[in-house]
Image (spheres, grey):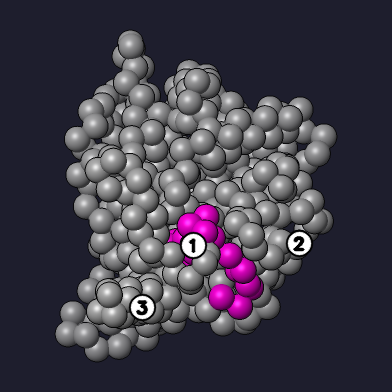
Amino acid sequence: MVRSVAAGLILLAGLAANPAQAQLAADATGADRTPVSREGDPPTRLPPAYPMPYLRPTEATVKTAMDRVLAFIEQDTPVGLMDGAGRSVALDAANGQSKLRPGFLLTSYEWGVTYAGALLAGEITRDPRYTNYAAERINFVSDVAARYRAQGGDARATPVRNMLAPDRLDDSGAMSAALIKAQRANLANANVRPQIDVYLDWISNRQFRMPDKTLARQRPLPVTLWLDDLYMSVPGLAQMGALTGERRYFDDAVRQIQQFSARMFVPETGLYMHAWAEGMEPHPAFHWGRANGWALMAMVELLEVLPQDHPGRDAVLAQYRAHVTGLARVQSGTGLWHQLLDRPDSYLETSASAMYAFAIARGVNRGWIERTAHAPVAMLAWNGVSTKINAAGEVEDVCVGTGVAFDPAFYYYRPRHVRAAHGYGPVLLAGAEVIAMLRGGSPLDGGNGQGLVFTAGTAS
């Protein structure tokens, strides 16, 4: 009897030290057999073993995670040119053998999103390191492009081909939006605006379109819509409208949202299919996570600057709300979303989850969606994303670049890697917007089994 009591006390002490182990367990009959963590406590008061931070989020904890990401990308995106032997090359000596320093590509669409994330982080946190990070690199690559443009010659022989001679929306959309944001914030040098015009010329005048002016690709089938292209076009168009005041850019951005949505949004699920091909019927709907993130962020970017009196504003806002509703239904208990949103046996993916955290928090902050219902969705999303930022500041479990397919295996087995550049910008966007959301009123203090509960608060 003494031995039995002693063993029980040791077990209870161990459970008290590690409350995550003091969860309810059932034997074969379904009866609970797990001791409670404190003598006399009923099982209903056992602490949950959350796999992510949950209660009492703070601005400081969010920014600490963001700062790790910033430190990593500062180290891994050096500014400068070099020759084939790795020696530094001055800008005025750049030639066909010069290269950007190794690291994440400073002119890619993924890094366009990262610049946008850093600009927003600087604006919200007032930490100049974020603003300087984006401004320094935006101005540098614009200077490099201007140098090679003045030289003439084959753009393909330069390290900035996608700036000199864009030939797809991937080259133009995200980078143009970031450059225009820098221009509007008075952070851009004299070479930025000419580069903006190059990008917008491609989007507006040169990209392949369907007869109704919907932006499309000619792969893998002759007329194919990629949902990703909403972000590769709409933010640039929207920002150009805000920069110039020309309504045609807003009109085109609204057109893309409406015409993509008519073909690709599935009302029954509240989710978008990743791809649509002309003449395919029935059309297989694979709800890829990151593509849905591109679509949701595109709507947010447009709503942010679209004039209140624009005739398409109500339709875009209604589409955004319908999409948020669909996404909230399929959020996992960790706060993250699955690679294929409606298939919980597919892996949990970080970049899409960060995109949703940003876009839903922005909707809460702007009053586009109801705070008490949606702030917990965004907060839980950030909590999940934060577990994917490792000690080095790398973002884990990010799906690599992905084409389109009409079968599930393609999506299920896409690799994940910290070098997949798609995760870094969305994480900065999400963290910044969640900080703004917390400033509107943190959730009520958890207790007595209460979870994340936000009051009405105030919109920023």
Q: Mark 3 points at which residue?
A: 9
Q: Which residue is rendered at x = 32% and y = 21% of the image? A: 284
* Front position among marks 1 and 2: 1
* Front position among marks 2 and 3: 3
> What is the magenta range?
42-61
In the shown orientation, is residue 243 left or right of residue 271? right
Determine whether 413 is above or below 398 in the image. Answer: above
Q: Which residue is rendered at x = 52% and y = 59% of the image? A: 42
Disc 3 marks a residue whose amino acid type is Leu
Secondary-structure class at tag 3: helix
Q: Which residue is rendered at x = 52% and y = 67% of the image? A: 40
Disc 2 marks a residue whose amino acid type is Gly
The CA span between labels 1 and 3 is 17 Å
The CA span between labels 2 and 3 is 46 Å
Quadrant of the rendered image containing residue 408: top left
Tell me the quarter of the image containing the C terminus: bottom right
- Provide residue 68's location: percent of width, then percent of height: 45, 79
Secondary-structure class at tag 2: loop
User: Disc 2 vs disc 3: Cβ atoms closer than 8 Å?
Assistant: no
Please name whichever residue, 223 or 16, is drawn nearer the observer in this view of the structure.
16
Instruction: Categorize mark 2 by other alpha carbons within 10 Å: few (<14), some (14-19), many (20+).
Output: some
Q: Name the residue under label 2.
A: 440
Instruction: Categorize mark 3 by other alpha carbons within 10 Å: few (<14), some (14-19), many (20+).
Output: few
Please name whichever residue, 377 or 308, is drawn nearer the observer in this view of the structure.
377
Q: Mark 1 points at which residue?
A: 46
Secondary-structure class at tag 1: loop
Quadrant of the rendered image containing residue 441: bottom right
Disc 1 marks a residue whose amino acid type is Leu
Choose the circle earlier in sequence order: 2 or 3: 3
* Predominant SS of the magenta segment: loop
- Provide residue 333's location: percent of width, then percent of height: 45, 49
Q: Which residue is rendered at x = 47% and y = 52% of the image? A: 335
